[in-house]
Every structure is written in C-alpha cells, then in structure tokens.
C-alpha cells in the first residue's frame, strides 16, 4: 500500500514538472521567434557599414584613424566584455561562453591584467569561484537590448581606446549562426579591422569623395563599432532562447518517458496488490470449509 501511494505521488510530481517544462518551451519558442527577427534584421545594416568602410579604404588608399590604429602611447592591457544570461535552464549556453572567456583570460596576459566587464547574472558566481572579479557588471540590457543603450556602451569603449587606457576591446559571446548552430567566440571590437578589400578584375572604379575620406571615416567607423556590438548582443539573446527551447524540450520528453515508466510500475504494483488480496480471500474461505 505504501509503495503504491509513493509511486502515485511521484507520478503526479512528474506530470507537474512536464507541464511546467512544456510551458517554458512554448515561451522560449515565442521569444526565439521575436529575437531571431531582430538579430537577422540588424545584420544587413552591419554588413552594409563594413562594406562602405571596405570600399572607402580600397579606393582612397591607406587611411589612418584612431579607431583602427589607436593612440601612439597606450597601456598594454585589454578590456574583455563577457555576455551571459540573467536566467538559467538554458543548457550549456552560459558554461560554453564562460569556459571560453576563462581560456581567453588565462591565455593572454594583457586580458588577464586588464578590465573585465560582465553582462548577465549567471557569470557572477562562475567568475567569483575562479577568483575573478569583474570591474563592471551591466544589468540594464535584459532580454531586449536597445540600440541606444548599446551605443552608449560602445562610445565609452571607443573613448577609452582612443585615450590609450586600453589596448584592445574584445567581446566573448555566443554567435548565432542558425537555429541549429550557435558558437561561442571571442570578437575583437577594437581596434577595428575592416575586411580586406578583394582584388577585382577589369576596370577599377574611380570615386570622388565629398566630404574627404577622413571625414567619412569619422562617421562610418563609430557606427561600425556600435552596430557590431549591438549585433553581438542580439546574437547572444537569440542563442540563449534557442538553448532554453532545446533544453526544455529535452526535459519535457524525459518527463514524459519517466511518467510512462512510473505508470507501468504503478499498474504492476496495483495488480500485485489485487492479486494478493484475492489470494488472501480465497485462502480464508478455504480455511473455513
């Protein structure tokens, strides 16, 4: 009797867990659809800005800019920004990003001795366990980072880089490639290195710049840095929702399998109990004859 009651309680608990994970899977799927739309919508703008910078560099010759070359005198330390999530239950999303960040910090003296900044709550305990304390913990972005907030953060990084306070700015985040593939990587945000211009066969185009190429770079390069950082935030958010969607689907499937196994176990225990009671009744009746 006690065994049947215990199995029944476990069966009810597994059913409740399955309903919760199923609901969380549906919520993550809905958020993923919106986040994917935002992430894919910003990529053409980012690629377009880099295309303009590449075309400008290819036609105007060797150009110098503080965001590309940096100041002459600067400290030999880097700034590392790590993007994690505020909530858990998203599989190996945070652990993959944090392990890569840890390898990067331990493998580079400039990164290890430099500034470490963190976005999200899930990286705090990990860094504290590894005896690393972030200099700044950003909590203002959330699930839907706004361009204005990211642009302000990018402007702070550009000001510090051009002033010589840091030699480089790198972002550790989860890059969104497709719904079935996400990859943790370290992105060099500053100094900004535009893609190398490809050689074209045939007649080269001749451009006249108005204003001058240097003035155009003054407007294009900061926009490229801001757009790149905003793309990193969008990729991180959509990758988080994908990881949570996959993790909750796996949890729902496992809860369903466990529920079926407990249901079989419950039926067998109830059948054994009924058989035992019938045997006792028949034995009692036979003893009275």
Image (cartoon, helix red, strand yellow):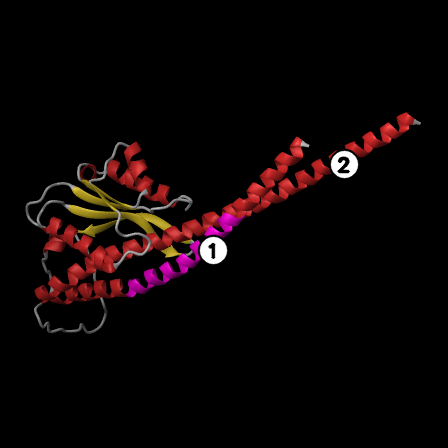
- The residue that label 2 is drawn on is 274
Whether residue 102 is visible, yes or no, is yes
Query: Residue 75 vs residue 6: left or right?
Result: left
Q: CA distance from mark 2 to mark 1?
A: 41 Å
Give the dominant element type of the magenta stretch: helix, strand or loop.
Answer: helix
Measuring from the top left, give residue 26's x and y in whole percent. Answer: 47, 55
Are there few (<14), some (14-19), or many (20+) residues within 10 Å of tag 1? some
Most extreme residue toward the right is: 289
Measuring from the top left, give residue 120's x and y in whole percent. Answer: 30, 46
Most extreme residue toward the front is: 288
Q: How many marks?
A: 2
Q: Quadrant of the C terminus?
A: top right
Q: In the picture, residue 204 is in which quadrant?
A: bottom left
Sequence-earlier tag: 2 or 1: 1
Q: Nearest the camera: 113 or 285?
A: 285
Q: Nearest the camera: 179 or 14?
A: 14
Residue shown at 11% from the left, 45% from the top: 165
Magenta-tinted stretch: 19-44
Query: Residue 271 vs residue 182: left or right?
Result: right
- The residue that label 1 is drawn on is 26
Q: In the picture, residue 272 is in which quadrant?
A: top right
Whether residue 195 is visible, yes or no, is no
Q: Is residue 80 above or below residue 33?
A: above
Query: Residue 113 vs residue 267: left or right?
Result: left
């Amino acid at each position: 009797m006690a065994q049947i009651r215990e199995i029944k309680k476990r069966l009810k608990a597994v059913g409740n867990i399955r309903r919760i994970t199923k609901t969380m899977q549906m919520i993550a799927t809905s958020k993923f659809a919106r986040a994917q739309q935002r992430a894919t919508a910003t990529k053409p703008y980012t690629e377009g800005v880099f295309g303009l910078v590449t075309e400008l560099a290819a036609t105007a010759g060797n150009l110098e800019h503080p965001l590309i070359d940096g100041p002459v005198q600067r400290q030999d330390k880097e700034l590392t920004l790590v993007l994690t999530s505020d909530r858990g239950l998203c599989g190996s999303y945070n652990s993959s990003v944090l392990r890569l960040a840890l390898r990067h910090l331990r493998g580079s003296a400039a990164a290890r001795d430099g500034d470490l900044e963190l976005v999200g709550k899930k990286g705090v305990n990990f860094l504290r366990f590894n005896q690393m304390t972030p200099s700044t913990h950003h909590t203002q972005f959330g699930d839907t980072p706004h361009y204005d907030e990211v642009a302000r953060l990018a402007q702070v990084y550009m000001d510090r880089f051009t002033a010589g306070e840091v030699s480089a700015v790198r972002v550790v985040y989860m890059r969104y490639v497709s719904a079935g593939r996400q990859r943790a990587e370290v992105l060099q945000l500053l100094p900004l290195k535009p893609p190398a211009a490809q050689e074209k066969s045939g007649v080269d185009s001749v451009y006249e710049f108005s204003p001058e190429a240097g003035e155009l770079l003054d407007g294009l390069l900061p926009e490229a840095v801001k757009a790149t950082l905003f793309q990193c935030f969008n990729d991180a958010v959509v990758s988080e929702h994908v990881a949570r969607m996959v993790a909750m689907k796996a949890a729902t499937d496992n809860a369903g399998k466990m529920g079926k196994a407990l249901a079989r176990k419950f039926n067998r225990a109830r059948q054994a109990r009924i058989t035992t009671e019938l045997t006792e009744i028949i034995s009692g009746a036979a003893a009275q004859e």
